[in-house]
Amino acid sequence: MSIMSFTTNCLSMLWLQPTKSLLFKGVLLLTVFLILNSCNKDPEDIGNTLTPSQDLLYSNATDTVAILAHSMLSDSILTGYASPVLAGSYMDPVFGRTTAGFVTEYELASLSPAFGPGATPDSLILSLAYYGYYGDTNTLQTMRVFEISDALVADTSYYSYSPVPHYDTPLAVKTFKPRPTDSVYVDAVKKAAFLRLNLSEINPSLGVKILNASADDLNSNDNFAKYFKGLYVTADAQTYGGAILYFNVLSSLSRLTLYYHNDTTDSLKVVMLAQASTTTRFTVFDHHNYDYASQELRQQVIYGDTTLGQQTTYVQTMGGISTKIRLPNIAKWKNAAKTAINEAVLMMPCDAANGFPQVADLNLGRLASDGTYLSWGNDASGNPIYFLTGTYISASNEYGFRITKHVQDLVLGRIQDNGLVLTAAGPANKANRVVIHGPQRADKPMRLRVTYSYVP
């Protein structure tokens, strides 16, 4: 029964009671009138008259916030002591040609080896344990190994563009089809996949050099590093296909082994290793100025046509390409209303992988007015305030970031919109890349969904 029906029935019964009080009947009529009048109010409006209009709180949501985005060349990245190291070359239909190589020292596994009289090298074998790959391993690769000519310096910052002084004549040149997932049998024992390069087949000079080392050169690894400064492993640039190969030079399978004999004994060897904390190493990358990239990428990244970023943007590891994002209209919200940002989520759909796996995780950094990166900061528990995710969502082929506090700070004028920079996680030890939809793309554009409350 409705309130109105119930009230009507009660009124009828009370009105018919044998009472002579007109005052009672008047009060009764006024009460019923007030009850019926309140029943006509929208439940959401009840209590509004108790709150001043300027203090009413409204909520809304929008995903049409203006976004400006464009891609640019990344700053060079630190690659010293990165693990794994990368070597190889591949041709990408969008990003063009990339070549990677690495430099590393080697230490004696046992100090002061005694080579004996008449020591003569038989072979010098470089073994590199595979850690993974990116690209097409069905394409032939050509690797070259050189002895470096300048000593590496511990605690020095080595970057992706750092020069690699080395002797001109290679120690090895090997053309092969990579097998990064195939096991290898060594003395009838199954081992994980590794690459084997003979550094004495075309140029035995390094093997001879090691056997001619003095006792002082061999009594400490500091002295040995001054005598034999290390190796540079790189690849010939690919014209099609190809892959960037990942190597774990710290694996027990990775080593430099000199096999030799002397006047009295055959089948001798000395082992040299890369050590995690004491062996200096770094990786270098060459994107060939993106001369072989798509015209759309070159026009945006090399020639600076930032308007193209509204349709397509790019992110690449290996010190390649990053994307800058701005929210030019957010700051204007503070002039329209008192606004509280409940949630702001930036979603970035991307093109299909097409044989080039997407970047597993993206990073989003904030820029200062001078272009330097700023920390997002942590809460009292040490967790990032902004709750950024950036992990690839395979089900929807996109990435997402929650940037609620950043948007709120823009609304309140606490910070300037100098932009956000989108980069790939693992830039020194991965070769992935991704093509991201711009904010004006017709199909699944980049978008910022904001849920907010405001007082008009």
Image (spheres, rainbow, N blue to C red):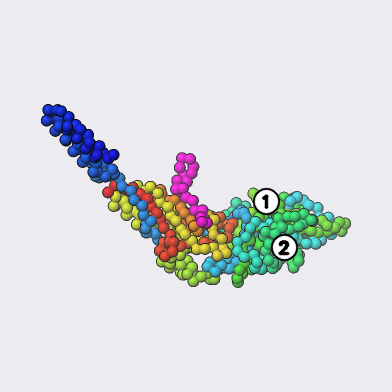
| Segment tinted magenta in the rendering | 376-395
> What residue lies at 18% left-to-right and 38% top-to-bottom?
33
Q: Determine which residue is flagged by label 2.
A: 197
Mark 2 or 1, closer to the camera: 2
- 294 shown above or below 57: below
Q: Nearer the viewer, residue 89 or 350?
A: 350
Q: Residues within 10 Å of mark 2 (few under 14, many from 20)?
A: many
How many numbered tags mark residues here? 2
The question of residue 73 being in magenta is answered with no
Q: Nearer the viewer, residue 226 or 43?
A: 43
- The amino acid on which the numbered mark 1 sits, given as a three-letter code, is Gln
> What residue lies at 35% left-to-right and 49% top-to-bottom?
452
**Residue 319 location (% of width, % of height):** 54, 60
- The quarter of the image holding the N terminus is top left
Q: Secondary structure at mark 2?
A: strand
The answer to whether residue 37 is left or right of residue 400 is left
Q: Determine which residue is flagged by label 1.
A: 275
Q: Secondary structure at mark 1?
A: loop
- The amino acid on which the numbered mark 2 sits, given as a three-letter code, is Leu
> What residue lies at 37% left-to-right and 50% top-to-bottom?
451
* Residue 283 appears in the rendering: yes
Q: Earlier in the sequence, mark 2 or mark 1?
A: 2
The question of residue 381 being in magenta is answered with yes
**Residue 378 location (% of width, % of height):** 46, 44
**Residue 106 location (% of width, % of height):** 69, 55
Using the numbered discs, state the Cα–Cα distance from disc 2 to disc 1 in whole angstroms: 20 Å
The kind of secondary structure the magenta stretch mainly shows is: loop
